[in-house]
Image: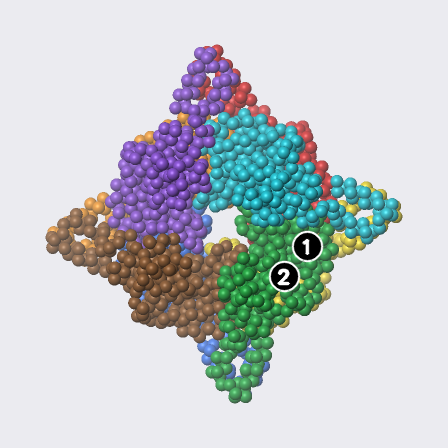
Chain colours: A brown, B blue, C purple, D yellow, E green, F cyan, G orange, H red
Amino acid sequence: MEREALRALLEQVRRGEVDADAALARLAQLPFVDTPHARVDTHRALRHGLPEVVFGAGKSGEQIAEIAGALRAAGQPVLVTRVAPEEAPALLERLPEADYDAAARLLWMGPAEVAVLGRGTIAVVTAGTADLPVAREAIGVARRFGNKVEAIFDVGVAGVHRLLAATETLREARVVIAVAGMEGALPSVVGGLVDRPVIAVPTSVGYGASFGGLAALLGMLTSCASNVTVVNIDNGFGAAYVATLINRL
Amino acid sequence: MEREALRALLEQVRRGEVDADAALARLAQLPFVDTPHARVDTHRALRHGLPEVVFGAGKSGEQIAEIAGALRAAGQPVLVTRVAPEEAPALLERLPEADYDAAARLLWMGPAEVAVLGRGTIAVVTAGTADLPVAREAIGVARRFGNKVEAIFDVGVAGVHRLLAATETLREARVVIAVAGMEGALPSVVGGLVDRPVIAVPTSVGYGASFGGLAALLGMLTSCASNVTVVNIDNGFGAAYVATLINRL
Amino acid sequence: MEREALRALLEQVRRGEVDADAALARLAQLPFVDTPHARVDTHRALRHGLPEVVFGAGKSGEQIAEIAGALRAAGQPVLVTRVAPEEAPALLERLPEADYDAAARLLWMGPAEVAVLGRGTIAVVTAGTADLPVAREAIGVARRFGNKVEAIFDVGVAGVHRLLAATETLREARVVIAVAGMEGALPSVVGGLVDRPVIAVPTSVGYGASFGGLAALLGMLTSCASNVTVVNIDNGFGAAYVATLINRL
Amino acid sequence: MEREALRALLEQVRRGEVDADAALARLAQLPFVDTPHARVDTHRALRHGLPEVVFGAGKSGEQIAEIAGALRAAGQPVLVTRVAPEEAPALLERLPEADYDAAARLLWMGPAEVAVLGRGTIAVVTAGTADLPVAREAIGVARRFGNKVEAIFDVGVAGVHRLLAATETLREARVVIAVAGMEGALPSVVGGLVDRPVIAVPTSVGYGASFGGLAALLGMLTSCASNVTVVNIDNGFGAAYVATLINRL
Amino acid sequence: MEREALRALLEQVRRGEVDADAALARLAQLPFVDTPHARVDTHRALRHGLPEVVFGAGKSGEQIAEIAGALRAAGQPVLVTRVAPEEAPALLERLPEADYDAAARLLWMGPAEVAVLGRGTIAVVTAGTADLPVAREAIGVARRFGNKVEAIFDVGVAGVHRLLAATETLREARVVIAVAGMEGALPSVVGGLVDRPVIAVPTSVGYGASFGGLAALLGMLTSCASNVTVVNIDNGFGAAYVATLINRL
Amino acid sequence: MEREALRALLEQVRRGEVDADAALARLAQLPFVDTPHARVDTHRALRHGLPEVVFGAGKSGEQIAEIAGALRAAGQPVLVTRVAPEEAPALLERLPEADYDAAARLLWMGPAEVAVLGRGTIAVVTAGTADLPVAREAIGVARRFGNKVEAIFDVGVAGVHRLLAATETLREARVVIAVAGMEGALPSVVGGLVDRPVIAVPTSVGYGASFGGLAALLGMLTSCASNVTVVNIDNGFGAAYVATLINRL
Amino acid sequence: MEREALRALLEQVRRGEVDADAALARLAQLPFVDTPHARVDTHRALRHGLPEVVFGAGKSGEQIAEIAGALRAAGQPVLVTRVAPEEAPALLERLPEADYDAAARLLWMGPAEVAVLGRGTIAVVTAGTADLPVAREAIGVARRFGNKVEAIFDVGVAGVHRLLAATETLREARVVIAVAGMEGALPSVVGGLVDRPVIAVPTSVGYGASFGGLAALLGMLTSCASNVTVVNIDNGFGAAYVATLINRL
Amino acid sequence: MEREALRALLEQVRRGEVDADAALARLAQLPFVDTPHARVDTHRALRHGLPEVVFGAGKSGEQIAEIAGALRAAGQPVLVTRVAPEEAPALLERLPEADYDAAARLLWMGPAEVAVLGRGTIAVVTAGTADLPVAREAIGVARRFGNKVEAIFDVGVAGVHRLLAATETLREARVVIAVAGMEGALPSVVGGLVDRPVIAVPTSVGYGASFGGLAALLGMLTSCASNVTVVNIDNGFGAAYVATLINRL
């Protein structure tokens, strides 16, 4: 899109409708002149054909409402991540249109039904119940981004038969998101079961030597399964984002 | 495949051709009874339709030759990674059929031409010349795995115009591998330029506070671009492996 | 100044007005005998021609008021950093003359208008909205220290076109302060765009593998841009202090 | 034993054969007066009914030969660990009686056949071929300590079916030693398959984010299987030592 | 047990009572079809002949009550760990049958008297009073798991005579759990006194350079006593679990 | 003292007044049988001729009162460290005899005046005002332990003249305690000024890259002054304890 | 410069001499089309008016000679850093024009005398003799970049009088580079003596808790002197680069 | 001494023999004008009444010979630490007067017999044989500094009876140096046995989780014995230096 805008500008210059100095100025600003609220990054999302996403953690309800309102006014669906249950009621008062999913800590403003654009299924597989909030964020984001999602919960590697029982579902997915805290071994075992990309999400679940997710993170990075890549600790959103891009290929 | 073998076994049991105890024994061993050399993991690769890969670092020339020979005897192509230039001559003597790529530290035994099975192009983009060995490993593996590869070298973020000049090439790729040491900022900038999955490979290039690739690794994991996932430090092979899986979707 | 005082003392000794023992005693204490409140370090600031700065974090309102009062009584302007919004009202009651800037967490006691002593402009460039408190501290301090400041917000490297659009402003600055959390890549890209010193400020913004700003800190220290130096995590004040010294050269 | 010696001494005191001062002196030294070479710790081993073990790493051949000679002269079998293959020939010249196992880096001086004192089997299970030296140290030590050992090699978690095929063998063991580098996930999966103590040995095998075995170590410490305890990185000897104690219960 | 169920299923297949597809489906799910509440992992415990254990930290009272209720409905005893004193009253209201031990933070639902199944005694030895909560968790769990326990408190290594006074008790135990924070030296000294397995539990007790238990953890992993293995920081439960398995051998 | 008790016991044995078994039992317990409350470690202090010290952090008011009461009942002075100001009032109600020093967070039960037993002066020198609580703990403990103390506050190395002005006082001390957070450089400079032992106390004062006192700790450990030894972060008590021992030599 | 080229291109488009597609293509490549060797980054340096710098570490003599030759052919002076003494002879054979400074590990190809462009003096101050190689790199680079340099060696903070004796020289400098390993306290003391920017260079000199320069790095980042900024460990080049930029202001 | 020189100078000024400017200049340089070789720090040592010490690691034989020669020419005894056995022969050729102690890696130039100036004994106690080089450095330095030394080797805490046997010797010392690698528990146990200062020296002995001495260092810093202070890893020299200062009190 920017490429087309650029070409149009250059045509205007060629036809003498815009002179060099003006072109130079517009050239620099083109990619983001047309948004109502300059602080909101609307471009990447637009380019990717995905709704706007606002990272809610560390933002006040007022800030979230302002940003989300501006985006909605611009006609775009908005997804706010990391909205804690205790912050939700006040936000919902400001944004009555919004839909809140407490388990996933997601706030959604947009059509109730999202068209499925992903070509296959994304499987989200989780080790322990404590990892559920991160897994649900991944699931909620993936669905709002237009994917079919299969959720497989509570299949930690210390009870490997249960994980094996889900092999069929895992193999039918186009891409797998594996969420695990503690030693983070789940993606390695899952990676051996499927021939699809596995996106590993370490979680900060654990205590002591888990060091806030470091143990799981290092474990996933050194996985002996070659089809595993890793995102940041607790980054369910990022995993769903990349899985969406893969699922649209 | 294992599923079919399993079904066949169960049919044999049902028809009384195999009794329960024997079935039980075979059930346990089925997935890998048919390989000539039990120490070699041939199964994952077979399942994934990819050549066998042997991680060469830390193995003696004798060990590599033995494993590669067994695999070749089984009719499979073999790719050995991390073969240092000083180890190559002795290996090539043992394995006269092999082809060695010193820049990528890869040893290949198989057809000179590999059929292109990837549906698009994999772009491999690199920050500095010191990152080249890792980038070349990724490129060499991706090509041997049947992908078209576009290589974009020497486009570090401190000279961002050169990277922007490659935007076209980056956007035409189906998946991008971004290789960088030092601060590891390249995947973030690349991630903002494309709407495809970006696989980030931190390298151990650098000194002092790079702490053997830790700075780059942490930088990539906390990237502000949402389409970035990360593999282990210097793991050009792993990045190419996942990129291949994505490129076949 | 101390040098002159020292010379004067030695002259007094030479003229026999002060004997050796007394001179010895005064020699040791000279640099700071003349302050009303011994606990306050007024010397560095006096020497540097800058207002007094009190680091507010971890000090009680009573302590801050006492120190600031003593300095004001000595006729000096006072700047208190890291005054949290919830602590400000009580402080303002004690120090009715003071001016509080909540976004920058700065409390100022001195002339409403500060003479501009810096020879050029200091540009303060920021990656994300979450980095704003640190950036605003840098801006507020730089202004109270007599500098013209250009603020460029929300130009993270994952949307590099917006940063490029600010190239003009960046290049017109005499020194640049680049504030970023997460992977901290901003100073590297900025460093490539300008031929001025870039002072990088990592922020503790982020989660998981950002490890409280460590990822950004390591990234900035290993920056591939040669014109980047680094201050402590969240140290907007220190960056503004050094930028002021540079801008007066 | 010391207890008995202590009782004997006290009896001597009671009978007036030894006075208080002499008793006091002997009391302090009793546990180790009777060894020919004071620098060698012979007591723990004697107490535990196990042969002497000398940690060979960092000791010169001369030192090893001297210590081992003294112990042999005292009639005890001696086991030297961490004897690198390149150091072995010189040692064997000094200690012609010794038997060297290069794969396990163990040097043995004692009866060719050791009586089996363990009540069951110790299973030693290994993830990758690179972990073999550590596994073989554990196996060699366990055998020299009088245990039956079952070795299960090359059953990494990314190929979990192979591990499952060994379930029978694992379950028949009285105690399991699980050796793994990289992400160190093997003990978690093994721990779920057996209801016996699992001693996990992280290895320094790996690169990049394995950080010399740290990733495996943290993973094993945070294992979701409750029957896992951990020893130091590469400490195959320690694992075999504890497994021996358990196997004698 | 699963083995028997598997054999039975195979017999049914052989007799034609179950066809291959159905068998295949059941094969995958067998190990855990028969629990009322799928999210609860009942299998490992059943297999090990131990009561169910629920890790209470991070779970809401509602979640704990639901899980514990389901397990009790299935006729199993339930042990909930890490129940903070402030959460206990609400839980006890929901689960009137339960018994709460505040010092050990354990909630128990089951017979008041547990049959002693362990063959010997487990000694639990503690360095400082601050380590008591972890030690009491180990003691409480070990007792509910059917072991006789000897508790030895307050025998830190800086007062080694007190520890020596407990030598008798330590040597009579079949397995020792040594709990210590700070420098974590207790297991090394204890390990030298006994010829039994010593399970070391580092605690997060300490400040400054104890780094949340890291100092104790590293100290225990590098213990010069060969009979020491280590569990995660503060993991009193895990130590008791493994000690139970050893004590039943 | 224990030595004398031991000699006495052995004499009793020799005279037949005590038989071997009884002696054995008493031998083990001798060093601490005579305290009223077994959980309190009274021995080290008694041996060292110092009052009892209770580490108050993490203990409830009830626990502190109980321990302190028992010790007082035994006629010993008691010093409780790390008593936060908000916990003091409740404690003082339970222990009306006690004297509380809020700045040092110390609670004292004993004679108002302590006899000076130290042979010289202990100098306590501090870098910043934020380090004062730790410095005051050191000062308070040193005084209660019978030392003359010279306090030198606010002499950070960035204003080195003020530190030099205190050279006289520093050189007159028999031992110096240097307390500093941030970069912890004070002990190095002080160490160069005096020819006495310097005990360095890193504090957790700072932010960002101070990592809770780690920067100061590492700096002090690597000090270029040879007369510096180091205690744990914030351990003002420990520094005063060792300084007392040195000052009594 | 690029700006002018851009303007020229746009004028060509306006005049119809270049059409939109061609302009688009050239637009992307303009900033670096005119260099003879595409792998060499000549732009930043050109823009900054400084000679080309090649980081020699990790490059073969052949690579260095090739790059340097290309740059020399383009008429530019070349500075190669981190050329180890043992590599120099072979390089000097390839590049007979070059001048090698072994103490600074610098290779220079350009005019013997460099015009002084810096407006004042750069002082380079060093703590210990082991820090000299890094200090000499900074000095050599600063001189080749056209600065007057004052070198002050061997003024560690444990002998603070020697540092004070250099105060005059330090205060006459426009910018100070402070090089120190171990605890890295030098920049803090220097920062208190001058009112100029101090660029701190931690070195990897030290052992044990210096952890390869980490102690010095953290110390410098948390310096209590406000006029200190920090570069990477051992990065004498970077410090000289920034000092040059400052000295030209 | 400097104080006297200062007084003399001031008297000269008072008598008009030196004018203010000259005095000013001399004032700055006084503490070290009178050494023949400016790079050698002779002042601290002179002030402390100890021989000069040169840290030999990382210095060439030529450098060591030059420095030592200059010091010897000035009539001072010289002690060079960290002289590796392989470097000694060449050094001894240059410095024929020198005496080399290979076990301690110390080179000594001075009187064969050093007068005993220490008032009591320094006990040096060591855990394992691998810690001996560090212990011997401490012993050698302490003796050359004029102390009587008692060495107690091989008394690791896992054989605590041997350590107890040395209690007498330990208690007779005026100060104790405790050297230990691995978990570094020795100083804690020693600290409980004596009422003297204990200087703990962690060593880099160990593997895996000892992380180059970090485990021992952290253990010693968090010791539960209050009379322990710590020096850098492997810093036997520093421990002996401080012990000497204490022993002269």
Is residue A241 rendered to the left or right of residue A159?
left
- In the image, what residue type sits under mark 2? Gly
For the point 36% across and 48% down, which residue is it? Answer: C131
Q: How far from the left and from the top, in percent, is residue A70?
A: 27, 57
Residue underneath mark 1: E152
Residue G30, disc: none
Residue underneath mark 2: E140
Q: Quadrant of residue F99?
A: top right
Secondary structure category for the residue under label 1:
strand
Subunit ID for the residue under disc 2:
E
Q: Is residue C175 at least partly visible in the picture?
A: yes
- In front: C40, or H103? C40
- In the image, what residue type sits under mark 1? Ile
Total marks shown come to: 2
Q: Are marks 1 and 2 in contact (CB under 8 Å)?
A: no
Q: In which quarter of the image is residue C74?
A: top left
For the point 52% across and 17% down, which residue is it? Answer: C21
Spatial separation of the CA atoms under disc 1 and disc 2: 14 Å
Q: How far from the left and from the top, in percent, is residue B212?
A: 45, 51
For the point 30% across and 55% down, which residue is it? Answer: A66
The relative height of residue G109 versus residue D142 in the rendered view (above or below) is above
